[in-house]
Amino acid sequence: MRWIFRLIGLVVVIAAVFVGALFFLPGERVATIAADQITKATGRKVTLSGETRISLYPVLGVATGTVEVANADWSDAGPMLQADSLKIGVKPAALFGGDIRITGLEAVDPVIRLERAADGRVNWELGVEGVAPSGQATDSAAPATSERLALTLDRALVTGARLIYTDHAAGTVEELRDLDLDLRWPEYDGTADFEASFSRGGGPVSVTGRLDQVGRFIDGAVTAVAATVEAAGGRVAFDGRAGTQPQVQGRLDLDLADTGAFLGALGMAGVTLPEGLGQSLKGGADVTLTDAMNLSVRGLNLQVGGNSLTGAADVNLSGDVPRVNAQIAAGALDLSRLAGADSTGEAAGGSGGGGGAQGWSTEPIDASALALANGEMAFSADSIDLGDLKLGRTRTLMTLDQSRAVFALREVRGYDGLVTGDFVVNNRAGLSVGGTLRAEGLDMERFLTDAAGITRFSTKAGGTLNFLGAGNSVDAIMKSLSGDGRFETGRGVISGIDLDRLMRAGDVTGGTTIFDAMNASFTMDKGNLFNDDLVMRLPLIRAEGKGRIGLGARDIDYLFTPVLLEGETSQGLAIPVRIRGPWENPRIVPDLEKAIDMNLKEERKKAEERLEREVQKRLNITPEEGQSLEDAAKDKLEDRAKRELRKLFE
């Protein structure tokens, strides 16, 4: 803000020089003398081209042709200020009273170039000779007979301006186009009301507001200010106090129906925020910004796309990216659309968020927001809807560092259980997720139904999981999962098969199996889970299992082998069951070949031994040591064939 008023001060000085010569010189000489005097006063060469016209009625003033004010000597960007024309109106009575009261100031199609050098120098610091920062003539710069020079501005109009800001240290260039300004500043130390509009390529932006005690603000004091910024997508309003250091304190209110469109209008195009996490914002907070670029946010209350957030934050804005320390609390948090499914759990776009029959979601995951800041955030929510998964009370501490977020899960309630551990989302070189989780007391029927569409398994379970996956979609991540873990359960039910009826009567027509406990360990590789030590205990049955579960392909190929117990120790009939097919509808059938091999192994061996003895007896064969019966029989037949052939030639 300060440089705006310095530029206005420069233009006012130009106006003062013009009106001072108004009654003493012909119009054709006004431009030359005015340019020389302004150059001397500001230290910047001023060039006035074209005809200078003097108006006596209906408004006393002058109109110039092209105006140029030279840039700082270290800049090669061209004039700091140039305009096609400049019109200045004054009050006649003010000329005789020693004060200059400007009734109108209009600049047409100006181009303003603001620059910050690599060493921190700025080109808008101008020395205005004879005018103190407060607007008063300084004793050292003005003649002893000089009277007080009080500059005021009833109205200033700027139309069609271009403002170009170049930061040589950061290597950035920003530009505002179609800048219009309507400023009313009737008293130097009074209130200025302003209306402005501009474009940065994303649609028009309008700014309206007021600034109290303008003279003190220019001097560096903190004064009252109110401003409202409106653009496509919504509005932002501030009411409080501010200074040029910068220093800000007051209330900030937001009403953004489309945050991305609003940021795009301000020149931050391409920012895509997920629904439920900033795509729309409404609310406000009390903010304080110090000259060290430390931002304090208190009393935060936001409606974020249907989600309610409260909290506080401290943000350091002096670095390349903000560093945040925040505490955020939410009520019932709905992130179902972020997970690729709507609030009913159906897949967005028909690709399946997780539990549907069509597979995992292939929608790209935009994790670019991880690069917007660094820092720590303590977060709590009463519940979280992730589309497929439904969580209860959640408390976590997120540490964000260079696009890598680590969530320390202090408490995650869900499915009647508790999950703790660490969860990592890393977007430094492509998106990956991983972590170490511990769970206890999970209702597996509800959890597996939501997570994978598996409805046949009901029990309480606990265990550990170490995992890592990479990819830009849920589908890609699930197909890349690696890691290991273990789980154990209490009493439970498997639907679709009655092992006791199967073992005793050979009935495979369905039913349920009630078991006392189950435990297993597993490994994961390329989206497949492998297990070979599953043990399930039933009252009169012991079951073991091994096989593959396709986490990425959403299928299963598993051999489950129940063994009927005769008493407590002896083993009876074993009937392996093959579970194969998609998660949504796997086939569960007995593996008869495996059953015969397991249950008739001893009988088969005895039959084979009896057959061998009969062959030896009939062929009169005695195998040598280390020789099989088959090889001995071949040798016997070969010898007999040779003897018969010799008889043909004798």
Image (spheres, rainbow, N blue to C red):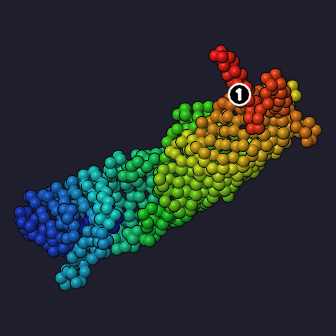
Q: Nearer the viewer, residue 535 or 391?
A: 535
- Is residue 281 toward the left or the right of residue 51 in the image? right
Q: Position of residue 209 (x, y in %)?
A: 39, 58
Q: Residue at x 60, y 42 (%)?
A: 527
- Residue bearing the label numbered 1: 635
* Residue at the spot 58% in from the left edge and 43% down from the top edge: 526
Q: Is mark 1 on a helix, strand or loop?
A: helix
Any part of residue 380 in sight: no
Q: Quadrant of the N terminus?
A: bottom left
Residue sitting at x 32%, y 66%: 169
Using the image, determine if residue 582 lies above or below residue 440: above
Left or right relative to 608: residue 291 = left
Rendering coords of residue 345 (x, y %): 62, 37
Answer with the quarter of the image where residue 501 lies. Answer: top right
The reply, left or right, for residue 5 in relation to residue 80 is right
**Residue 35 in sight:** yes
Residue 450 place in picture, x, y as percent: 67, 39
**Amino acid tagged 1:** Asp
Residue 557 vertical placement versus 21 (above, below): above
Q: In which quarter of the image is the C terminus?
A: top right
**Is 76 above or below relative to 207?**
below
Task: Single out the residue that lies furthest toward the right.
Answer: 567
- Examine the image and state in which quarter residue 570 appears: top right
Assess disc 1: are there few (<14), some (14-19) or many (≥20) residues with their C-alpha within 10 Å of its C-alpha: some
Give residue 178's position: percent from left, percent from top. 27, 51
